[in-house]
């Protein structure tokens, strides 16, 4: 029997996860099907449980259900438990296993694909929503010199910094406090690019060799990446690599084989252009 997987979200029609996972399955010779599942905002548990009832083996979780998935899981990995957000559920022998692969996806894209070590760097993360919550522990595990979280609602950045302080040097600030500071890696984890907006970063935050990384992926440069370009950031990258790498880690959790990601990134780039 073909094993069933899906990505669940609201909205969901835009998701590229079925394409990515079917390419991984072809490449590794795995017999699986991967669909999109829409859930109403108050219907995550029902839709997920129906999927399990029909024999579903695993789910990826996207906006806005990563907190719901965290609560549904009855066994969590350390990284999922610390981030309090789950993007990968595995259903086996009546147990619901929860993991979060967003952070490892981001770190692999930066360190391996973009060849930019995080160790010893000054890292700035913009935003304090679900995506940022999922990436802070894996970023801190790379041992940056310091990690700063900046957010429009300052209290959220401060709360995240306090929550992750046991795992490394991290502080939470508002945007005005970034004036006069410089960073080597600046990651936009806000949703501003989806609305063609720029987070209010002061001029001058990009160090001369900086990486400007936008978690949102798009055909052209996002407003954040355009700002990075104007300020002479050395490397500009969108979140397509993160998307494919987090999917590869989920695929590995489910199937025990690591797919090759570069070719799939190329296919996805073509589809999105
Ligand atoms: P959330 O809705 O949880 O958080 C949104 C964040 O953006 C908040 O910090 C919010 O600040 C900030 N924000 C929104 N509008 C503005 C604005 N006008 N100015 C400044 N800050 C703003 O979203 P997520 O964290 O789940 O997702 C963030 C982005 O990351 C999404 O665009 C998503 O597509 C992307 N993403 C990409 C992934 C990938 O694999 N490439 C994986 C996961 C997410 P405030 O708290 O003040 O409201």
Image (cartoon, grey):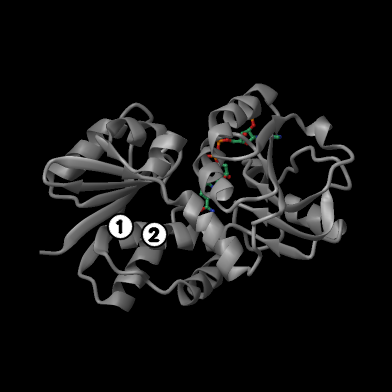
Residue 162: x %, y % from top left? 59, 27
Tag of residue 253: 1
Residue 50, by quadrant, is top left
Q: Say what secondary structure mark 2 lies in.
A: helix
Left or right of 47 on screen, residue 160 = right
Residue 190: x %, y % from top left? 63, 41
Tag of residue 249: 2
Q: Residue at x 35, y 56 (%)?
A: 250
Image quadrant occupied by the C terminus = bottom right
Question: Badge 2, how many Cα within 10 Å: few under 14, some, many 20+?
Answer: many
Choose between 78 and 74: the one closer to the eye. Answer: 78
Q: Residue at x 54, y 55 (%)?
A: 106
Cβ–Cβ below 8 Å for labels 2 and 1?
A: yes
Q: Is residue 124 visible?
A: no
Task: Tell me: residue 234, above or below residue 160.
Answer: below
Residue 230, by quadrant, is bottom right
Q: Residue at x 56, y 68 (%)?
A: 112
């Amino acid at each position: 029997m073909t094993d069933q997987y899906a990505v669940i979200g609201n909205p969901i029609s835009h998701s590229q996860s079925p394409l990515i996972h079917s390419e991984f399955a072809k490449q590794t010779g795995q017999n699986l099907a991967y669909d999109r599942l829409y859930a109403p905002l108050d219907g995550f548990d029902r839709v997920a449980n129906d999927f399990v009832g029909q024999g579903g083996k695993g789910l990826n979780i996207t906006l806005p259900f990563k907190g719901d998935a965290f609560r549904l899981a009855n066994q969590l990995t350390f990284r999922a438990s610390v981030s309090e957000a789950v993007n990968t559920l595995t259903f086996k022998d009546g147990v619901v296993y929860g993991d979060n692969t967003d952070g490892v996806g981001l770190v692999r894209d930066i360190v391996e694909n973009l060849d930019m070590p995080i160790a010893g760097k000054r890292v700035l993360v913009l935003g304090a929503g679900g995506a940022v919550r999922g990436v802070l522990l894996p970023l801190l595990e790379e041992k940056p010199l310091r990690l700063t979280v900046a957010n429009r609602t300052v209290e959220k950045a401060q709360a995240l910094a306090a929550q992750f302080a046991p795992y490394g040097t991290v502080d939470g600030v508002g945007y005005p406090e970034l004036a006069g500071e410089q960073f080597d890696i600046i990651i936009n984890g806000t949703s501003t690019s989806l609305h063609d907006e720029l987070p209010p970063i002061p001029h001058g935050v990009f160090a001369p060799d900086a990486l400007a990384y936008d978690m949102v992926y798009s055909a052209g440069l996002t407003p954040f990446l355009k700002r990075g370009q104007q300020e002479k950031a050395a490397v500009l990258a969108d979140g397509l690599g993160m998307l494919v790498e987090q999917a590869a880690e989920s695929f590995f959790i489910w199937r025990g084989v690591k797919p090759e990601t570069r070719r799939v990134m190329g296919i996805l780039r073509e589809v999105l252009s």
